[in-house]
Image (cartoon, grey):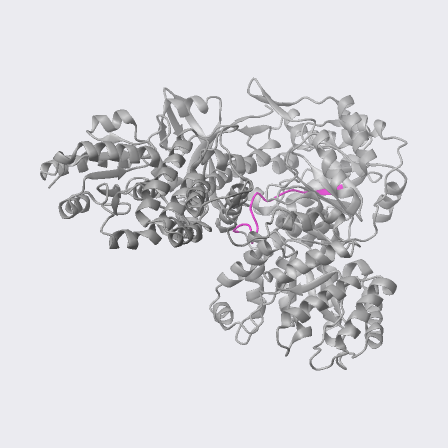
Amino acid sequence: MSSRIQAILEKRLFILDGATGTQMQASGMPQGVCPEVFGCENQGPVSAMHAAYRDAGADMITTFTFGGNRYKLSEYGLTDAYDVNRELARICRRAVGDDTLVAGDIGPTGRFIEPFGDVSFEEAVSAFKEQVKGLIDGGVDMLTIETMLDIQETRAALIAVRELTDLFTIVTMTYDPHGRTLSGTDPVSALITLQALGASAVGCNCSTGPEDMLGLIRAMKPYAAVPLVAKPNAGLPRLVDGRTVFEMQPDAFARHARTLAEAGVNLLGGCCGTTPAHIKAVAAAVKGLTPMSPRVSSLSGLSSARGHLILKPGAPLAIIGERINPTGKKAMQAELKEGKLGMVRQFAQDQEKAGAALLDVNVGAPGIDEAATIRSAIGLLATISDLPLAIDSARVEAVEAALRLYPGRALINSISGEKAKIERLLPLARKYGAMFILLPLTDDGIPATAEKRRGVIEHIFEMALTHGFTKDDFVVDALTMTVSAEQGAALETLATIDWCSQTFGARTVIGLSNVSFGLPERRWINAGFLAMAVAKGLSLAIANPENAELMNIKLATDVLAGRDAGAKAYIERFGAQTTSAAPTALSDGKAQAPAELVHKAILEGDREAILAWVDKALEQGSSADTLVNDVMIPAIRRVGALYEAKTYFLPQLIASAESMQKAFARLEPLIKKNGAGATKGRILMATVKGDIHDIGKNIVILLLKNNGFEVIDLGKDVPHEHIIMSMQEHRPDLVGLSALMTTTMVNMPEIIAKARAAGLECPFMVGGAVVTPAYAESIGAAYAKDGVEAVKVAEMLISGGKSKKSK
Amino acid sequence: MREPQIFTAIPPTLPEDAVYRRLGRKQDITAISRAQKNEIQAYMHDAVSLVQLKGSARTLTIIALNDGRIELEDGTVFESAALAKMLDGCQEVLLMAATAGTAIMQVIASDIAGANITRGVVLDATASEVVDAALTWIMAYFNQALLRQGRIVTRKRFSAGYGDLALVNQRTLYQLLKLERIGIDINESCILIPEKSVSAIAGIRGGYV
């Protein structure tokens, strides 16, 4: 049957059918019923719909089984998905006859699958298999997995299909207006994952009208080794008088369909709101158009759930982050043994931030269940990192566990010529669509010379060919050996890279740091070797991306090897960098005094430089008192004014306050030594009982301290009694209370009443999201809307109210 | 009656403009240097890497809606004229909640205690907006699932503590959504813990028939 479909695809656009759900509702299917049961019990309207689409010119008619999985059916009390699907497939066949193709329709379960949800991956595969078996036994010619929101659920459905049949299978996902699925997958990442996993055609359906689908198709086409599919809605839904309508008429829909075909779509149909009239118009509009075949026959690309890496010739060197590996890391080994993944998380995030293009994942260590642990690690990494993963394990079962769960196209690190492993790993790579690192060693060991390595590489490639792989599906490990043991080893590696790049036509990878083992100052050997390897055409290096020196050399070599167009990445990294590490004291060509620079550092919130300027000012004879009173306090007051004018916003205010705090901490001992440093007053601060929000209160405290107040912070969720006792103990000049919620704000008057009852007369200042000036006044307190205002209120209350102090 | 649907790993999105607004930036007034912008954006990305977004949602049929009183199929009643107005014409409510988890709260607490208060402030604002965006994500998820029925989720949503919907209703939402399953607790003041947790109510309306 696939050959019949292929024959159509080679000569013309393949026409799919249109909406089924909306069509059936228009035919009288009531809201709230199970569509599949309705279909089984009302064969007339279902058959009529199928026949209408056939008569409109559709090459393929989908069964009315979109929600025919056990999860959806169980919402209506049904348990036998197999029977329902088989019956609806038979109804479809009877309706359209043997000359029209019937496609078994598979929709989402409405649940999220691990690692993104609470349904286990195997349970999801099992549920889809139940549906697929019913459809196959009902006589479908092909399958269509559609309207998928989540790549992992899509994988589960496709794996279920491929473990049962090799029928032609269309897979389409649903993208939002920003071009991502709800789970964040972009169309190219989805394409890479699904075509490698065995989808016969890939594309998009539902959610958007045809105009918005054009961008998705254009993004996918350059990388598609399979035909592309588009099934747009008839425009966007609108609510008119409480009813939903799709307003795009067949003629307009067909015009857009033709544009989609011209952009590279090979299979065209419709989704919500489309009718047989829309499909008839589409068939007419694309009649005579020559379909645009896939532009590539294979793709060297890797993907995660939310990102991808395409290994194009001439692309920048890609660094595979090596740190997720317990070898030599006792703390990580101990963590993994306890089933914890804290370091895996940390290493992943740090390496991603440092510029890794992929993450190598190795959890092999004595005493660890490697298959279970790598599965957990893959699950975690899939949710926290956008980078594709390299599955690094010597155990075949661990590799399989990881590949099955991984929601993308992974890189297996590695497949060598060792007989027992290659025979198991190549089929696994094929089944899950993984790329692999071809490791040119055999049961006889590591070939010492480049020439011998060539023979092994060619031998492994021949075996890979028999499983359907191409040179785009692997990268060759050029085998980095230690130069301290054999000085010619590096040259053999470089020769291997050169041969792969120039003659054999394959991408290459090296494990960088091996080269320098046993030598002092290894970084220089590593750096030199990396530059030489890039010059020979190296594609990837396994290394530590947190080594800034290495990453800088990578950026430089990318420029020099013509792999960073316009030196864009290099300029982005270094363009804004100044060369001076130390403060220069120059501005507009004039020397500035250190005291001026202290002022400037506070204004700019420069927490890095301020201490150097304070020290310099002291060295040049400024006194601590002068610096605080004549430089720093005017600076922070200026910051307050800028904040009030909204020229500054909160992070700038806080950065300035932190700079001030740092400088003050340096000067405080000197001020005390001089006998100065009297505070403006003592303030007690608390977030009231029941309230856990304290960030606002802490900002107020920072600014009060900046402005010379002594502050005692009682923290958050503070009981009334504790506040009263603290007032009695510390005798503050002012008490500040904070509350964020209406339910906790009511504690404020209670605290004030208790204080007054205890004979404590000091003023109160209140604030927080729900507190208003009127409320403050009603409870006998002053109000401050933010930290800057709190300073003013405190100054006013304390300078004018010393006589009321609770002493 | 449908059980709450649990989302164990909602993909975080960074609504950058909303974070800037929450931090008080005024377009065309606030002046931010390139270095400051880089620093703030790096903190925003730190926040995104620290949140562990989980959610819970469920739909319930509206049995009666009048005079500021909304009665649901399970007997739950919300009293709020503003909420009733938003739900006018809806057949169902969509109840939902999301949390950023505890990891980011620990880092914010450490930063605010003095490690890096500037970062703490940005992390705090970013976490608030990322959790809010998670509710938007849940609504988008339901919208997609409802599209085939021609039904849509209201664009607006309503939280307990806003307008005339008393904060005490957060306890009802907590129970209906089984929020303990996603690591959320609620205190005697009806505040959700961890702090960066939110709940809300939206409506579902429309249909082809």
Relative to B83, say whether A596 is above or below: below
Classified by dominant secondary structure, the portion drawn in magenta counts as: loop
Q: Position of residue B36 (x, y in %)?
A: 51, 42
Relative to B208, say whether A518 is above or below: below
Whether residue A409 can be seen here: yes
Number of on-image labels? 0
Q: Which quadrant of the rendered structure holds the C terminus of chain A? A: top left
Q: A796 or A177, which lies in front?
A: A796
Q: Is A52 colored magenta in this rendering?
A: no
Q: Is residue A786 left or right of residue A759?
A: right
Res A88 quadrant in image? top right
Relative to A420, say whether A778 is above or below: above
Q: Position of residue A63 (x, y in %)?
A: 71, 39
Span shown in magenta: A103-118
Q: Is residue A344 left or right of residue A795?
A: right
Query: In the image, what residue occupies the spot 27% across and 32% down?
Result: A793
Residue reaching furthest top? A241
Res A801 quadrant in image? top left
Whether residue B177 can be seen here: no
Res A460 quadrant in image? bottom right
Q: Is residue B33 left or right of residue A433?
A: left
Q: Is A113 colored magenta in this rendering?
A: yes
Q: A582 or A593, which lies in front?
A: A593
Q: Position of residue A62 (x, y in %)?
A: 73, 38
Q: B184 or A802, which lies in front?
A: A802
Q: A248 or A672, which lies in front?
A: A672
Q: Position of residue A38 (x, y in %)?
A: 62, 34
